[in-house]
Image (cartoon, rainbow, N blue to C red):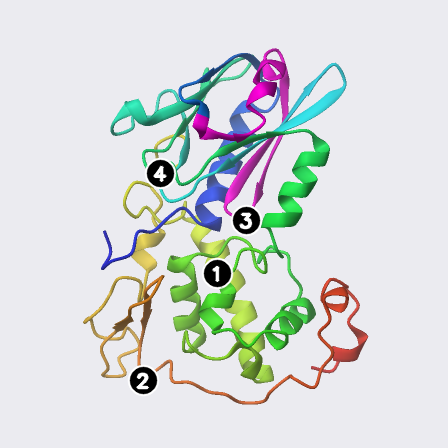
Amino acid sequence: MCEGTRPMPELPEAEVAARQLRDRVIGATVQNCWVGRDDIVREGLSSVEWYRHAKITAVERKGKSIILTFVRDDQARFLAAELGMTGLLVFRSTETKHPQHTHFILHLEGCGEPEIRYWNPRRFGRLSLFDQAGLDRYTARRFGYDPLTISLPQFTLLLAASRSRLKSLLMRQQVIAGIGNIYANEILFRARLHPDQAANQLHVKAITRLFGIMGEVLHEAIAMGGSSVRDYFAPDGTEGRYKRRHLVYAKTGEPCPNDCGAMIRRSPGERSSFFCPTCQRGNPGRSYKHYRTSSTLVGRSDHKHVSNI
């Protein structure tokens, strides 16, 4: 465990899992659904029988969660898997510690994988079974913008609308969905921004730099299979290699990788911040408080009033 924190799968790890599932189980038919304990299904347990003989037609990621689409008799239903702190979706051939913590299994036919298993020893994550209306409510309630698809104008307005600490805002799933403690620390270090910087006090260049680095870090982490910290691995059992690229996460007391002469510090809190006190000094810069930042405007894509930012 990393200095008082317990990392969880974040956007890159969930994206890797979704891609593996998409490659291997699309078109499969569910033979049976095994539920090891009822409380692992947060919503829709009474509908579990419907999924038998349904076909998996899509797998997508929303934030840190994975959503599978099933179709039967021209009707669609969905399974949303929250990975939580220790949750994994794995194939039957993947060995896990303490197999008694496998709480849900989809038995499949018509694909190369006979099973999808939901393994979650601490059970902070849950499964939910939805119809379309239920899924719409779930996604609207839980997920803000995706950091891989948000535009720079949208990102600018989100920062301008918030007085929150920058790291806290990046991790707020209802605002930006998918970034957790590991990647927030790594993104902010590379962007040379202090985690406690006020979001609405960043200047133009800092916002643009942060936006670009956010995408670079997440895409690179996905390409390397995510970060295997603690118990995480992909559905096929492979470990993510991005941990080797971590520059500050859990590096307290180590020299700054920028060779500035400072040591990486840890700021304790709900989610520990790891930062360089020299490279990530606070830089209030220009404020955007004078721009309009209504929730209606933030959701639009044109943002003509900030076209010159």
Marks 4 and 2 in Cβ contact (< 8 Å): no
Looking at the image, is mark 4 or mark 1 nearer the viewer? 1
Q: Is 130 on the left-hand or right-hand side of 214?
A: right
**Type of the residue with mark 4:** Phe
Q: CA distance from mark 1 to mark 3?
A: 11 Å
**Type of the residue with mark 1:** Met
Q: CA distance from mark 4 to mark 1?
A: 22 Å
Q: Residue at x 71, y 82 (%)?
A: 291
Q: CA distance from mark 4 to mark 2?
A: 34 Å
Q: Residues within 10 Å of mark 4 (few under 14, many from 20)?
A: many
Marks 1 and 3 in Cβ contact (< 8 Å): no
Q: Quadrant of residue 185?
A: bottom left
- The range drawn in magenta is 39-68
Q: Closer to the N terminus: mark 1 or mark 3?
A: 3
Q: Residue at x 74, y 14 (%)?
A: 73
Q: Position of residue 242 (x, y in %)?
A: 36, 52
- From the image, which quarter does the C terminus lie in? bottom right
Task: In the rendered view, tell whether residue 292 sits above or below residue 110.
Answer: below
Q: CA distance from mark 2 to mark 1?
A: 23 Å
Q: Which mark is residue 233?
A: 4
Q: Position of residue 237 (x, y in %)?
A: 34, 32
**Type of the residue with mark 3:** Gly
Q: Closer to the N terminus: mark 4 or mark 1?
A: 1
Circle 4 SS class: loop
Residue holding disc 3: 63
Q: Residue at x 20, y 71 (%)?
A: 254
| Viewer-closest of 172 and 216 | 172
Q: Closer to the N terminus: mark 3 or mark 2?
A: 3
Marks 3 and 2 in Cβ contact (< 8 Å): no
Task: In the rendered view, tell whether residue 149 sits above or below residue 165.
Answer: above
| Viewer-closest of 285 and 237 | 285
